[in-house]
Image (tube, rainbow, N blue to C red):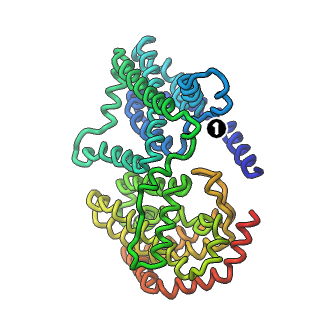
Amino acid sequence: MGRGCLAGCLIALAAFLILPQLIVIAIYLELFIVDYLGWSDPVAFINTILLYYFMLEVLMRMFLQKLPSMEISAYLPHPIKIPTLAHLTLTGSLVSPFIIVIPLMLTYFSFTAVQVQAGVVGAWMWYLTLIVFNLFIHYGMITIRRISSERPFIPIGLLLFFSLLHLPMFFDGPVPADYTAWFFNQAMQNPVPLMLSALLLSGAYSSAFYFYTHNYHMDSQGDSSGRFWKKFAVTLPERYGLTGTLVNQEIRLIIRHKRARSILFFSLLFLFIGLVMYPDEEVLGIGSHIMLVFTGLMLTGMFLLQYGQFLFSWNSGFLDAFLAQPVPLRDYIASKYYLMILSCLLLYVLILPYAWFYGLDILLGNTCMLFYNMGINVFLVIRLGMWEPEKLDLESHSAFSFQGVGLAQWIMGLPLILLPGLLVIPFLAFGQGVYGLLFLGIMGLIGMLLRNPIIRLLARTMEEKKYDMAQSFRSN
């Protein structure tokens, strides 16, 4: 409870410090666009970037937005109809930080810059179109979140959809932001965009309303995500033995719990950082191999770094029972190793198209850092994961919680990220950045070849620490 109060105080302090700054930014937004960014038409600039704002909002809502809920047992003795409860629930969901961003940032802008160009009526139509479209996203994401609880690959589908939208840009095709700019430019001139946004909002609200009216029953208040995972068979061939069984158990843990599952989705979301990093000339230029090191390290090892922070904490709820079983710790450590290896390989396959768009230097950097992650970082993660792990209650905390985060979790990422940069600096000093990448890749290959003795060494280390770890989980 103390940690929750501390987190609430920090959030309140952040809001107290940030909100006044956002208000100032909103007032001076037009001047910032014209004087600092160099756009002569601030309204055209806002209309252009709205697509990227809405894309970012959709992705953030996918991971951060809480689904509206209401404890209906108190209302059952009263003559209140289910549709009324559904309307109350959906209306109450409007109390959300995502709802206030556009009114906070663009209200003043609407009746200054937009009104100068389009008049009072045009400014009102443009502003209302923004508000209504934002509400459409709000209620549309409620439905998508509900569906994704049984079909969790929908977030991945959204990422692929946003990627395909920008694919024509690489072949000198149209830019998707141009369509958004045209839509909101039209909103200043005629009411058609506003009416279209209202129709979309009506459909999204009706869809969410339909779901709630058909699921507002006491026997449907449980977690519906389990229905999907009962159908989802994650099985490994029997020839992999006990290690394969433990990997299978770990995968089921990931796809069952929201916090672990959010790390998987966040790792996939992070793959798009290459669209920002690789087109930069400093990344692809001569002597820039250290940027290739860090970018490749993160792209191929994001799941490794994020999931590895709580490598043993994920099992804190049943570690005592596990240690009481006749399971060799070598197999237990090996299951952690192969799970993270599989994640690195999966991420590497997904980022292969970057090499086709940006050149073979990208392929070299990502391949070398893949080997480094699989041969060096994976063992560092396992070893550092044994250092004062914190208990993690998967049933009471969801995604983006600070539960289970201790001092060790805050600093264990430093050697994982900084060490390869330090190792490549001597090569950069002599202008041989390519050899630095190859050196890191060779180190990783050597680590992979020595995986069996290293796993045995880690198993002996855990043999010494397992009772302290179990005691730590019991006392937290």
Q: Which image quadrant: the C terminus?
A: bottom right
Snapshot quadrant of residue 324 = bottom right
Which residue corresponds to mark 1? 18
Q: From the viewer's perspective, is 467 left or right of 167?
A: right
| Residue 406 x, y percent position in the rendering | 68, 62
- Give SS at disc 1: helix
Q: Residue at x 54, y 77 (%)?
A: 333
Q: Position of residue 257 (x, y in %)?
A: 54, 55
The amino acid pointed to by label 1 is: Ile
Quadrant position of residue 103: top right
Q: Residue at x 37, y 52 (%)?
A: 275
Q: Do we see residue 204 in this rendering? A: yes
Query: Which of 6/343 is in front?
Result: 343
Marker count (numbered) = 1
Task: Give the vertical position of 109 relative to 151 (above or below).
Answer: above
Q: Residues within 10 Å of mark 1 (few under 14, many from 20)?
A: few
Query: Residue placed farthest to the bottom in the image?
Result: 453
Q: Position of residue 192 (x, y in %)?
A: 33, 17
Seen at 40% across and 31% down, the residue is 45
Whether residue 373 is visible, yes or no, is no
Rendered view: 256 above or below 186: below
Q: Is residue 338 above or below residue 50?
A: below
Point 35% across, 31% down: residue: 180
Q: Is residue 133 left or right of residue 27?
A: left
Is 271 positioned to the left or the right of 462 in the image? left
Give the x, y percent position of residue 36. 48, 36
